Amino acid sequence: MYRGRNMRATAIFVAFFLLFTSATIAVPVPLFPGNMVSTLFEMPVSEYMPYLEALTNGLTYGFISWIVFLFLARKIENSLTTEPKRITR
């Protein structure tokens, strides 16, 4: 049971990581927290900075969506196991 949920959670993380990473690269609009990387770490602005910002956004939003999925999956699983089973004929 847990293996299936972990596999789905991994797929959710990878999907949202790729989505937000590619969206940050494709659309040149500053997106939090990626736009804060250069100021937080006092890094000079260079031509690889958009890729670092995209990686930061992908990791952050992929992790957030992964956590949300795990909590929702656990809540749904618990609600399904606590409901009494009805037998209809």
Image (cartoon, rainbow, N blue to C red):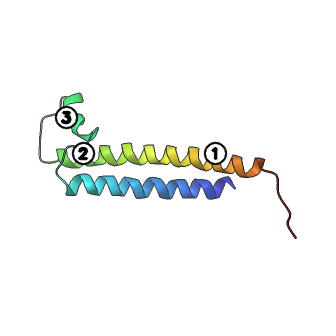
Q: Residue drawn 63% across and 59% down?
A: 4
Which mark is drawn over residue 52?
Answer: 2
Q: Secondary structure at mark 3?
A: helix
Of residues 12 and 71, the one drawn nearer to the viewer in this rendering: 71
Residue 38 in the image: state x and y as whole percent: 19, 34
Q: Residue drawn 40% across and 54% down?
A: 16
Q: Earlier in the sequence, mark 1 or mark 2?
A: 2
Query: Residues under labels 1 and 3: Cα distance?
Result: 38 Å
- Do we see residue 41 in this rendering? no
| Type of amino acid under label 3 | Ser
Which mark is drawn over residue 75?
Answer: 1
Q: Quadrant of residue 25?
A: bottom left
| Type of amino acid under label 1 | Lys
Label 3 close to label 2 by CB (< 8 Å): no
Q: Secondary structure at mark 1?
A: helix
Q: Quadrant of residue 31?
A: top left
Q: Which residue is mark 3?
A: 38
Which mark is drawn over residue 66?
Answer: none
Q: Residue drawn 51% across and 55% down?
A: 10
Q: Residue drawn 20% across and 43% down?
A: 30
Query: Residues under labels 3 and 2: Cα distance?
Result: 9 Å
| Type of amino acid under label 2 | Leu
Compared with residue 46, is residue 5 higher up or lower down, i.e. above or below? below
Compared with residue 78, is residue 89 higher up or lower down, i.e. above or below? below
Quarter placement of the N terminus: bottom right
Would you call the spot at circle 1 few (<14 residues within 10 Å), some (14-19), or many (20 or more)?
few
Residue 17 in the image: state x and y as whole percent: 38, 53
Q: Secondary structure at mark 2?
A: helix
Q: Earlier in the sequence, mark 3 or mark 2?
A: 3
Of residues 52 and 35, the one drawn nearer to the viewer in this rendering: 35
